[in-house]
Image (spheres, grey):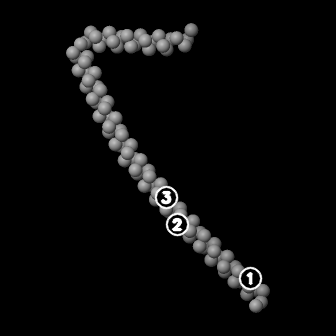
Amino acid sequence: MPASTAIDETADRVDKTLKDAEKNINDMTERAQRTINEGLETLRVQARAYADTAGDSIDVAQRYVAEKVQERPLTATFTALGVGVLIGILLAGGRR
């Protein structure tokens, strides 16, 4: 077997190996991209559900506070004033 034939066969094998490797890398990239997209879609759906639940909880809390303020406006006013004073004291404590 002449040397040029052996070199040509080796070059063909190397070329085929490189093409196979490129195809495998492309396939793995596509699978990874599909998996990532599916994961992102799952996260998006879950985040939407959590946001809806949080929004409902905020609405319930807001209605509760509004009802309590309407039932006892003076108590609510003094409570808010007390909380404001406490927060002010806490914030001003670091400035001394």
Q: Residue at x 29, y 13 (%)?
A: 76
- Give the residue at the far bottom of this rendering: 1
Q: Is residue 8 left or right of residue 56?
A: right
Residue 13 sits in quarter: bottom right
Q: Earlier in the sequence, mark 1 or mark 3?
A: 1
The CA distance from mark 2 to mark 1 is: 30 Å
The CA distance from mark 2 to mark 3 is: 10 Å
Q: Which residue bears the numbered disc 3?
A: 33
Q: Residue at x 50, y 11 (%)?
A: 92
Q: Which residue bears the numbered disc 2?
A: 27
- Give the residue at the far left of this rendering: 71
Q: Residues within 10 Å of mark 2 (few under 14, many from 20)?
A: few
Amino acid, disc 1:
Ile
Q: Position of residue 53 (x, y in %)?
A: 32, 37
Q: Residues within 10 Å of mark 3 (few under 14, many from 20)?
A: few
Q: Which residue bears the numbered disc 1?
A: 7
Q: Position of residue 31 (x, y in %)?
A: 49, 62
Q: Is residue 26 left or right of residue 79?
A: right
Amino acid, disc 2:
Asp
Q: Is residue 22 left or right of residue 60?
A: right
The CA distance from mark 1 to mark 3 is: 39 Å
Q: Is residue 60 above or below residue 75?
A: below
Q: Residue at x 59, y 73 (%)?
A: 20
Q: Earlier in the sequence, mark 2 or mark 3?
A: 2
Q: Position of residue 12 (x, y in %)?
A: 66, 80
Element class at badge 1: helix
Q: Earlier in the sequence, mark 2 or mark 1?
A: 1
